Image (cartoon, rainbow, N blue to C red):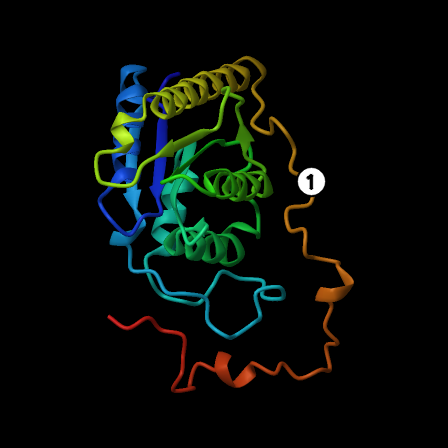
C-alpha cells in the first residue's frame, strides 16, 4: 500500500480494564504487520443517549445532538478497518457501545453508508456467559453497514473477570491476533484490487438506507409531527448536551 493502513478500535467499556487490555494486545499484532492501530475509548467521549424526538426514520440530515459522536464517526470513515470491542454487562452489550451504535448508526451512518467495504473485526469480553450474543450483535451491526468481515476461525471472544485475566486467556488472545492478521490481509488485498482495476466501488452498495420506502415509515405530509415542539430550536428542551 502506498500509505500505511489504519485500523481503528472502538472500546465500549466503562473502564480501563480487560477490554482495553485485549485491544492493546491487538495493537501489537497490527503494528508488527506495519499497520497503524488507534484505540478510541467511548468512556472518554462526551456522548448523549438518543432523545425522545423520534424522527430518525424521516429526517434527511444527521442527528442534531451536539457531542463527541460525530468525531468518532469521522475517524471510522478515515480508517481502513474497524474493530468493535465490548464487554458483556447484564447478559448483553455494555451500555456505552449500545448507545454508540444506536447514535452513530441512525444518526450518521444510514444516509450513505460510508463504512461500506471497510474491513471489520469484532471482539467481546465476558466472565463466562453471553460472549457469543454480544459478538453476534456487533457482527450484525457491521453487516448492516456493508462492512466486510473476514473469517478467522473461532470468534474473538475473551474470558475474564478481574483486571489482567484477559491477558491470561491464551486461546482468546490467539483468536484476536488471528482476526487482526486477517483484517490486515484483506485490507491489503482490497487495496491491490483498487490499484489494479482503478475501481473504488468494489461492492456496490445499492440502496443505502433500508428504511426508505417502507410503509411503516411513510408519514402523511399533512400529518402534524407529534415531536414538533421538541424539535423546535426555540424550545427550552432543545437537544443540546450540557457541557
Disc 1 crowd, CA 10 A, few/some/many (<14, 14-19, 20+):
few
Provide residue 180's location: percent of width, then percent of height. 39, 23
Decide: is 99 above or below 12: below
Q: Which residue is mark 1?
A: 206
- Would residue 154 appear left or right of 59 to someone viewing this image? left
SS type, badge 1: loop
Image point 32% across, 57% down: which residue? 68
Q: Identify which residue, 23 or 32, lies in the foreground.
A: 23
Image point 45% across, 42% down: which residue? 129
Quadrant in the picture for residue 4: top left
- Would residue 233 appear left or right of 45 to someone viewing this image? right
Residue located farthest toward the right when viewing the structure as drawn: 215
Quadrant in the picture for residue 160: top left
**Quadrant for the C terminus in the image:** bottom left
**Quadrant for the N terminus in the image:** top left
Provide residue 240's location: percent of width, then percent of height. 35, 73
Could one spot residue 209 in this view of the protein?
Answer: yes
Provide residue 128's location: percent of width, then percent of height. 40, 39
Image point 53% across, 57% down: which residue? 106
Decide: is 201 above or below 69: above
Q: How many marks?
A: 1
- Would residue 137 appear left or right of 32 to someone viewing this image? right
Image point 70% across, 57% down: which residue? 212
Q: Identify which residue, 222 or 46, lies in the foreground.
A: 46
Provide residue 164's location: percent of width, then percent of height. 21, 34
Could one spot residue 80 in this view of the protein?
Answer: no
Quadrant in the picture for residue 59: bottom right
Decide: is 39 above or below 236: above
Q: Identify which residue, 173 or 65, lies in the foreground.
A: 173
Decide: is 163 above or below 183: below
Amino acid at each position: 500500500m502506498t500509505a500505511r493502513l489504519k485500523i481503528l478500535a472502538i472500546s465500549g467499556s466503562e473502564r480501563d480494564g480487560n477490554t482495553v487490555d485485549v485491544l492493546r494486545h491487538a495493537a501489537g499484532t497490527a503494528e508488527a504487520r506495519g499497520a497503524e492501530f488507534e484505540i478510541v475509548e467511548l468512556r472518554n467521549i462526551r456522548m448523549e443517549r438518543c432523545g425522545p424526538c423520534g424522527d430518525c426514520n424521516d429526517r434527511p440530515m444527521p442527528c442534531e445532538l451536539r457531542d463527541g459522536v460525530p468525531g468518532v464517526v469521522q475517524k471510522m470513515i478515515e480508517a481502513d478497518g474497524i474493530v468493535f470491542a465490548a464487554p458483556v454487562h447484564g447478559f448483553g452489550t455494555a451500555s456505552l457501545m449500545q448507545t454508540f451504535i444506536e447514535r452513530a448508526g441512525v444518526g450518521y451512518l444510514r444516509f450513505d453508508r460510508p463504512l461500506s467495504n471497510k474491513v471489520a473485526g469484532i471482539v467481546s469480553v465476558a466472565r463466562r456467559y453471553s460472549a457469543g450474543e454480544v459478538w453476534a450483535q456487533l457482527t450484525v451491526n457491521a453487516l448492516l453497514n456493508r462492512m466486510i468481515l473476514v473469517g478467522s476461525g473461532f470468534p474473538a471472544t475473551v474470558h475474564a473477570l478481574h483486571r489482567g485475566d484477559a491477558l491470561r486467556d491464551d486461546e482468546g488472545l490467539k483468536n484476536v491476533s488471528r482476526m487482526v492478521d486477517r483484517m490486515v490481509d484483506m485490507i491489503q488485498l482490497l487495496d491491490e484490487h483498487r490499484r489494479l482495476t482503478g475501481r473504488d466501488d468494489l461492492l456496490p452498495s445499492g440502496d443505502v438506507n433500508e428504511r426508505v420506502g417502507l410503509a411503516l415509515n411513510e408519514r402523511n405530509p399533512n400529518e402534524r409531527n407529534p415531536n414538533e415542539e421538541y424539535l423546535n430550536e426555540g424550545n427550552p428542551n432543545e437537544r443540546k448536551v450540557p457541557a
